[in-house]
Amino acid sequence: MSTIMNPPAYKAAQEKARALLSSMTLTEKIGQLSQFGTSIYSDSDKLPDAHYSEGEVGSYLTIKGAQVTNAIQRDLLTATRLPIPALFADDVIHGYRTTFPTPLAQSCSWNPELTRRCNEIAAKEAYRAGLKWTFAPMVDIARDPRWGRIMEGYGEDTHLCSRFSEAAVRGFQGDGETVGKDRLYACMKHFIAYGACIGGRDYNSADLSPQTLHDVYLPPFQAGIDAGAATVMAAFEDVNGVPATGNRYLLTDILRGKLGFNGFVVSDYGSVTDMIPHGFAEDTKDAVRLAFEAGCDMLMAGPAYNEHLPALIKEGKITMEQVDHSVLSVLTLKYLCGLMDEPLVDETGEDCFFCAEHMDAARRAACETAVLLENNGILPLCTERLKGKRIALIGPLAGEEGKTHLLGNWACLKDPNRTVSIEEGLARALGASCELVTAYGCGIRCENTAEAHEKESSSVKQAAEIAARCDAIIAVVGEEAEMAGEAYSRSDLTLSGHQGEPIDALIATGKPVILLVAAGRPLILTPYKDRVAALMLIWQPGSSAGDAVADLLTGAVSPSGHLTTSFPVCTGQVPIYYNHASTGKPALGKWQFESKYQDCQIAPLYPFGYGLSYTSFAFEDIRLSSDKMTAEGEITVTLSVRNTGNTDGAAVVQLYIRDLVGSTVRPVKELKAFEKVFVRAGEAQAVTLHLSARALAFHDAAMNEIVEPGKCKLWVGECCTDERHEFDFEII
Ligand code: NOJ
């Protein structure tokens, strides 16, 4: 089944763990199930040093740097009876020190190998700082961009997210039988349906049908588990009324039983005691009982397991076998990664941070994740033709101040000082031949005082005056890093603060405006779409942001990113996702009684899969190996992708299906395969896509997983609305 979780190396580690377990006291055992660290939520947690003399701590989170982790490890090993090193963990989500584009941005590359590589580098840097475990990847499906954590995952589609999930796990853990040097254990999170929080409000309830849970939210976890994910994190929210952390059905029956997971589960930060305000647990002791019984092996963060498990065992509410089982899982992973033999890391290993190889990988990743949304032909900027010209670069995100925001949220040990700003990158690429003139424009947010509004207005005016004297304008708008991520839900997805004003003023100059959007989530771009010369979504591109933006604007690299979340016309459209169920009254524009809005179109502004390039592609000679397959069968789709333009570039071939009649209502479209292919100008590349009937399985009304016979449509296109190449096939 999985790569690291079954083979002989795992069994050998388990044997050693079993031997150690037999010599442990109860306090020491429970210590292995307790994680401590500096708290980002409160300062009430006791700090580590007060706590480990009797072996009360098995793991630490958010402790930074080889020197510190080594120091704690040394103390721990000398102060405790049994020298069991701690497992250091952190949120290594899109890089450790070298920061890569956010996971949502990475998914827009449609290149899972890119994520594998980013995570491989992130793992190396984090390992050198003493970490062995990352709280990533987040593989929660996100259909609501109001939810700030949409930035941490791989978008709205189950198939795409699943492919990125396995690549992300392989990137952190590698493909070997152990997770040794320069690797981290992955932690798939948040189990489960955290992205389904009602209203996009973080920590809010998820109320969803069992079919949606199984068909939409579980597969990315299955994919990561099959790739060998060693750990899983329980989610904060309640799923259909039962908090995920105390949900035995989810953590044991589904995760272990159905998905075959055999690593250990960690709670989310405080999610055990959160069951008290949920009204699900009476007090901390009750919460500990519920979490542990459900299958939550380790508690993040603090002493609740240490304090309450002994009494629960004494009272017979938790058995020693249950505790031993959890401890065995933790210890096995400590042996498997070599931690027990080599608890310390080489403190000189950190010289790989920000090295040229890592910065170059970050640059290439940022190039591949940007999505070109509009282009009237102004891009790529021709450096020859720019000679002697003046370009205005507007917005705080473009300069020094913007660096920290271009790194995005959850950027572990990010360093704005080791980040290439857009201004720096462009100045380097354009050289002395063309003048780059900068202006602030206005802030990303604005305090609601008359004075602040006035200041913004005068700054906007000044920017427009400067821009009017230039030949072209590049404006950068979007979000600050701390506007997306945990607890950063938004109710309004339009540009924050006064950001719309400089755009209007810049457009009014009559000079061509190239609008760059740097954000963690989809924003409302409706007012600007048709009024700017070009619109490019650069997301939060990471440490090499400026160099990547310069590569893209000057055409050194042709954009190849495609959206993995629908971009709404207005906030009122959300939740919005392309693979929604078929309604009985579809919006065909034929009569009054259709599923629509009276004040807004139902189609998004930019659909899932959409993205432009500096070249064009033709999908030719598309053939299906058969137009029929059995429930166990497969259809192979072959085609030739021709680059019909004058620029080298990469196409994303997307295969969608629609199951026309089902025993439960089927989605209007579903992505089932994709392939990104680089094609030189004028050349063609062969592409083969595989569609197995199993990929069309779904849960029927009685929750049986079935592949149903029947007719289907198939499209091969460049986005979910591209229906130029349509085929019929049948499951027999
Ligand atoms: C809470 C977040 O939900 C989780 O994703 C993260 O790993 C932990 N905090 C630790 O920082």
Image: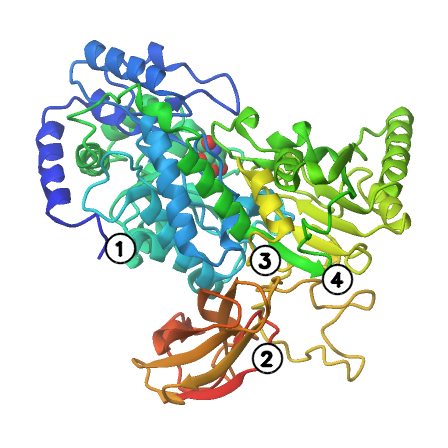
In the displayed structure image, the side of residue 176 where residue 277 appears, left or right: right
| Residue at the spot of label 2 | 723
The quarter of the displayed image where residue 348 is located: top left
Of marks 4 and 2, the one in the foreground? 4
Identified at 18% across, 31% down, the residue is: 338
In the displayed structure image, the side of residue 515 where residue 171 appears, left or right: left
- Amino acid at dot 1: Gly
> Looking at the picture, how far across and down is residue 273, in whole percent?
45, 31
Q: Which mark is residue 565?
A: 3
Task: Indicate the secondary structure of the residue bearing disc 2.
Answer: loop
Identified at 50% across, 70% down, the residue is: 654
State the CA–CA distance, disc 2 to disc 1: 38 Å
- Amino acid at dot 3: Thr
Quick one: label 3 or label 2, which is nearer the N terminus? 3
Residue 39 visible somewhere in the drawing: yes
Quick one: label 3 or label 4, which is nearer the N terminus? 4
Quick one: label 4 or label 2, which is nearer the N terminus? 4
Q: Is mark 1 within 8 Å of ligand 1?
A: no
In the displayed structure image, the side of residue 330 where residue 24 appears, left or right: left
- Amino acid at dot 2: Glu
| Residue at the spot of label 1 | 260
Of marks 3 and 2, the one in the foreground? 2
The quarter of the displayed image where residue 389 is located: top right
| Residue at the spot of label 4 | 376
> Looking at the picture, how far across and down is residue 716, in whole percent?
51, 77
Of marks 3 and 4, the one in the foreground? 4
